[in-house]
Image (spheres, helix red, strand yellow):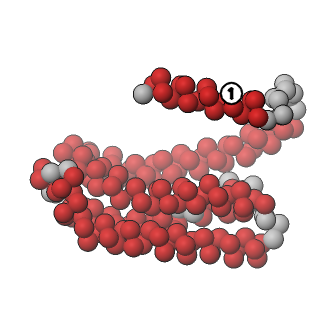
Amino acid sequence: LVGQSLVLTAARTLMMWWLSPWRPAWSFEPTAVKELLRFGRHLIAFNAVIYWENNIDKAVIGRLIGSTSLGIYNLAERIIRIPSTNVTGFAGAVMFPALCAMQSDVDSVKRVYLRSNRLIALVTFPMMSGLCVLAEPAILFVLGDKWRSAIAIVRLLCLAGMAQSVYNTAGWIYLSRGRP
Protein backbone atom coordinates (compact mmCIF):
# COMPACT_ATOMS: atom_id res chain seq x y z
CA LEU A 1 0.00 0.00 0.00
CA VAL A 2 2.79 2.41 0.85
CA GLY A 3 4.67 1.55 -2.35
CA GLN A 4 1.52 2.04 -4.42
CA SER A 5 0.96 5.45 -2.87
CA LEU A 6 4.57 6.51 -3.46
CA VAL A 7 4.55 5.31 -7.09
CA LEU A 8 1.23 7.07 -7.75
CA THR A 9 2.50 10.34 -6.27
CA ALA A 10 5.77 10.12 -8.20
CA ALA A 11 3.95 9.34 -11.47
CA ARG A 12 1.57 12.29 -10.96
CA THR A 13 4.45 14.63 -10.22
CA LEU A 14 6.40 13.51 -13.27
CA MET A 15 3.33 13.85 -15.52
CA MET A 16 2.63 17.37 -14.26
CA TRP A 17 6.28 18.33 -14.69
CA TRP A 18 6.33 16.94 -18.20
CA LEU A 19 2.96 18.43 -19.31
CA SER A 20 3.26 21.85 -17.70
CA PRO A 21 5.55 24.54 -19.08
CA TRP A 22 5.67 26.31 -15.71
CA ARG A 23 8.69 25.61 -13.50
CA PRO A 24 9.03 26.68 -9.90
CA ALA A 25 11.66 29.31 -9.15
CA TRP A 26 13.09 30.48 -5.86
CA SER A 27 11.95 33.95 -4.94
CA PHE A 28 11.45 35.52 -1.58
CA GLU A 29 9.12 38.44 -1.06
CA PRO A 30 8.70 39.54 2.57
CA THR A 31 5.37 41.24 1.85
CA ALA A 32 3.98 38.02 0.38
CA VAL A 33 5.18 36.05 3.41
CA LYS A 34 3.49 38.55 5.76
CA GLU A 35 0.25 38.31 3.80
CA LEU A 36 0.33 34.51 3.87
CA LEU A 37 1.04 34.48 7.61
CA ARG A 38 -1.79 36.93 8.27
CA PHE A 39 -4.18 34.70 6.29
CA GLY A 40 -2.74 31.48 7.69
CA ARG A 41 -2.93 32.39 11.38
CA HIS A 42 -6.70 32.83 11.16
CA LEU A 43 -7.01 29.58 9.26
CA ILE A 44 -4.95 27.74 11.87
CA ALA A 45 -7.11 29.17 14.66
CA PHE A 46 -10.27 28.21 12.77
CA ASN A 47 -9.01 24.67 12.22
CA ALA A 48 -8.10 24.37 15.92
CA VAL A 49 -11.63 25.40 16.90
CA ILE A 50 -13.12 22.93 14.40
CA TYR A 51 -10.84 20.18 15.70
CA TRP A 52 -12.12 20.66 19.25
CA GLU A 53 -15.70 21.06 18.04
CA ASN A 54 -15.38 17.70 16.28
CA ASN A 55 -13.65 15.92 19.18
CA ILE A 56 -14.87 17.36 22.49
CA ASP A 57 -17.84 14.99 22.47
CA LYS A 58 -15.49 12.01 22.16
CA ALA A 59 -13.34 13.24 25.03
CA VAL A 60 -16.40 13.65 27.25
CA ILE A 61 -17.91 10.29 26.30
CA GLY A 62 -14.60 8.48 26.79
CA ARG A 63 -14.01 10.15 30.14
CA LEU A 64 -17.51 9.88 31.61
CA ILE A 65 -19.01 6.75 30.04
CA GLY A 66 -16.02 4.63 29.07
CA SER A 67 -14.10 3.28 26.14
CA THR A 68 -16.73 0.76 25.02
CA SER A 69 -19.35 3.48 24.68
CA LEU A 70 -16.80 5.70 22.96
CA GLY A 71 -16.07 2.95 20.42
CA ILE A 72 -19.77 2.54 19.65
CA TYR A 73 -20.26 6.31 19.35
CA ASN A 74 -17.15 6.71 17.19
CA LEU A 75 -18.35 4.00 14.79
CA ALA A 76 -21.80 5.59 14.54
CA GLU A 77 -20.30 9.02 13.89
CA ARG A 78 -17.98 7.68 11.17
CA ILE A 79 -20.92 5.98 9.47
CA ILE A 80 -23.04 9.13 9.33
CA ARG A 81 -20.14 11.30 8.18
CA ILE A 82 -19.60 9.25 5.03
CA PRO A 83 -22.46 10.72 2.97
CA SER A 84 -22.17 14.33 4.13
CA THR A 85 -18.38 14.47 4.02
CA ASN A 86 -18.17 12.97 0.55
CA VAL A 87 -20.91 15.09 -1.00
CA THR A 88 -19.84 18.34 0.69
CA GLY A 89 -16.16 17.65 0.01
CA PHE A 90 -16.80 16.99 -3.66
CA ALA A 91 -18.96 20.10 -3.95
CA GLY A 92 -16.34 22.16 -2.11
CA ALA A 93 -13.66 21.19 -4.62
CA VAL A 94 -15.85 22.77 -7.31
CA MET A 95 -17.48 25.60 -5.37
CA PHE A 96 -14.44 27.15 -3.71
CA PRO A 97 -12.69 28.11 -6.97
CA ALA A 98 -16.01 29.22 -8.47
CA LEU A 99 -16.75 31.47 -5.50
CA CYS A 100 -13.21 32.87 -5.62
CA ALA A 101 -13.67 33.77 -9.27
CA MET A 102 -16.83 35.75 -8.55
CA GLN A 103 -15.89 37.18 -5.14
CA SER A 104 -16.42 40.80 -6.22
CA ASP A 105 -20.04 40.10 -7.23
CA VAL A 106 -21.75 39.53 -3.87
CA ASP A 107 -25.18 38.83 -5.39
CA SER A 108 -23.74 36.09 -7.62
CA VAL A 109 -21.86 34.56 -4.70
CA LYS A 110 -25.05 34.54 -2.64
CA ARG A 111 -27.13 33.02 -5.44
CA VAL A 112 -24.57 30.33 -6.34
CA TYR A 113 -23.88 29.47 -2.69
CA LEU A 114 -27.57 29.05 -1.86
CA ARG A 115 -28.17 27.00 -5.00
CA SER A 116 -25.25 24.71 -4.16
CA ASN A 117 -26.57 24.25 -0.62
CA ARG A 118 -29.98 23.28 -2.00
CA LEU A 119 -28.33 20.71 -4.26
CA ILE A 120 -26.24 19.35 -1.39
CA ALA A 121 -29.40 19.04 0.71
CA LEU A 122 -31.19 17.39 -2.21
CA VAL A 123 -28.52 14.69 -2.24
CA THR A 124 -27.60 14.31 1.45
CA PHE A 125 -31.02 14.57 3.10
CA PRO A 126 -32.42 11.48 1.32
CA MET A 127 -29.14 9.65 1.97
CA MET A 128 -29.33 10.45 5.68
CA SER A 129 -33.03 9.60 5.80
CA GLY A 130 -32.33 6.27 4.12
CA LEU A 131 -29.47 5.59 6.49
CA CYS A 132 -31.75 6.40 9.43
CA VAL A 133 -34.42 4.00 8.21
CA LEU A 134 -32.00 1.25 7.18
CA ALA A 135 -29.59 1.61 10.10
CA GLU A 136 -30.61 -1.63 11.78
CA PRO A 137 -30.43 -4.01 8.84
CA ALA A 138 -27.32 -2.31 7.42
CA ILE A 139 -25.34 -2.40 10.67
CA LEU A 140 -26.40 -5.95 11.51
CA PHE A 141 -25.57 -7.19 8.00
CA VAL A 142 -22.25 -5.37 7.56
CA LEU A 143 -20.89 -5.26 11.11
CA GLY A 144 -22.78 -7.96 12.97
CA ASP A 145 -24.85 -8.20 16.13
CA LYS A 146 -22.07 -6.96 18.44
CA TRP A 147 -22.62 -3.42 17.03
CA ARG A 148 -26.40 -3.44 17.64
CA SER A 149 -26.05 -0.67 20.25
CA ALA A 150 -24.75 1.70 17.53
CA ILE A 151 -28.09 1.61 15.67
CA ALA A 152 -29.88 4.13 17.91
CA ILE A 153 -26.89 6.46 17.86
CA VAL A 154 -26.67 6.29 14.05
CA ARG A 155 -30.36 7.15 13.81
CA LEU A 156 -29.93 10.12 16.13
CA LEU A 157 -26.79 11.36 14.42
CA CYS A 158 -28.46 11.18 10.99
CA LEU A 159 -30.40 14.31 11.95
CA ALA A 160 -27.16 16.07 12.83
CA GLY A 161 -25.65 14.80 9.58
CA MET A 162 -28.37 16.49 7.56
CA ALA A 163 -27.66 19.85 9.17
CA GLN A 164 -23.91 19.32 9.03
CA SER A 165 -23.92 18.69 5.30
CA VAL A 166 -25.37 22.16 4.74
CA TYR A 167 -23.82 24.33 7.46
CA ASN A 168 -20.28 23.00 6.93
CA THR A 169 -20.24 24.90 3.63
CA ALA A 170 -20.25 28.34 5.27
CA GLY A 171 -16.44 28.41 5.31
CA TRP A 172 -16.45 28.52 1.51
CA ILE A 173 -17.75 32.08 1.56
CA TYR A 174 -15.20 33.38 4.04
CA LEU A 175 -12.25 31.64 2.45
CA SER A 176 -13.24 32.61 -1.10
CA ARG A 177 -13.35 36.24 -0.03
CA GLY A 178 -9.92 35.98 1.62
CA ARG A 179 -11.35 36.25 5.13
CA PRO A 180 -10.61 33.07 7.03
Task: Give x and y (percent) for residue 104.
Answer: 83, 66
Q: Amino acid at mark 1?
A: Leu
- Residue at 69% x, 43% y: name it: 40
Q: Is residue 133 visible?
A: yes
Q: Is residue 147 left or right of residue 103?
A: left
How many marks are shown on the rendered structure? 1
- The x, y position of residue 18, in whole percent, is 75, 29
Q: How crowded is the residue under tag 1: few (<14 C-alpha within 10 Å), some, or many (20+)?
A: few
* Residue at 76% from the left image edge and 41% from the top image edge: 36
| Residue 73 rendering spot, x and y as whole percentages | 27, 53
Which image quadrant is residue 129 in?
A: bottom left
At horizontal 71% and vertical 56% (from top left) the residue drawn is 97
Q: Kindly indicate the quadrant of the structure image that contains residue 13.
A: top right
Residue 61 in sight = no
Per the image, the residue denoted by label 1 is 14
163 vs 96, nearest the viewer: 96
Foreground residue, 33 or 63?
33
Give the position of the C terminus as an image quadrant.
bottom right
Where residue 162 sits: x, y (%)? 42, 69
Q: In the rendered image of this protein, does residue 53 appear above or below residue 29? A: below
Residue under the image location 18 percent in, 63 percent down = 137
Element carrying mark 1: helix
Quadrant occupied by the N terminus: top left
Image height of 63 relative to 105, above or below: above
